[in-house]
Amino acid sequence: MTSKENQQSSQAPNAESNTELVKYGITRTQVDYFYCGKYRYTDLKDAIAQARRDTAA
């Protein structure tokens, strides 16, 4: 999935979706992604570790 596709798929829910979220007690959180080369990480320490490995190679 490209970052553009990811941005489109993570758009805010519409009014109908919000109703379902409330009905079922579903919560939504934002997630930070860290990109290092062609890889995507949700944990900064993993992205830094990969960057260090890339630099050492």
Image (cartoon, rainbow, N blue to C red):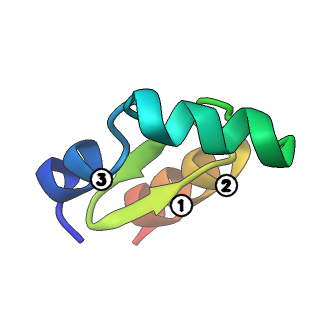
Would you name the residue on which mark 1 appears?
50
* Crowding at mark 3 (Cα within 10 Å: few <14, some 14-19, many 20+): few
Q: Amino acid at mark 3?
A: Ser
Which residue is found at the position 47% from the left and 52% from the top?
A: 51
**Mark 1 falls on what kind of element?**
helix
Residue 9 seen in the figure = yes
Q: Report, in whole angstroms, how far the alpha carbon at label 1 lies from the one at label 3.
A: 26 Å
Which residue is found at the position 24% from the left and 71% from the top?
A: 1
Mark 2 vs mark 1, foreground winner is 2
Q: Farthest residue in the right direction?
A: 25
Q: Amino acid at mark 2?
A: Asp
Q: Looking at this view, is 4 or 20 the one in front?
A: 20
Total labels drawn:
3
Which residue is found at the position 62% from the left and 49% from the top?
A: 42
Q: Report, in whole angstroms, how far the alpha carbon at label 2 lies from the one at label 3.
A: 24 Å
Residue 32 seen in the figure = no
Residue 28 position, x and y percent, is 68, 35
Q: Amino acid at mark 1?
A: Gln
For marks 1 and 3 on the same chain, the one whose residue lies earlier in the sequence: 3
Which residue is found at the position 37% from the left and 32% from the top?
A: 14
For marks 2 and 3 on the same chain, the one whose residue lies earlier in the sequence: 3
**Mark 3 falls on what kind of element?**
helix
Would you name the residue on which mark 3 appears?
9
Left or right: where 21 falls relative to 2: right
* Crowding at mark 2 (Cα within 10 Å: few <14, some 14-19, many 20+): some
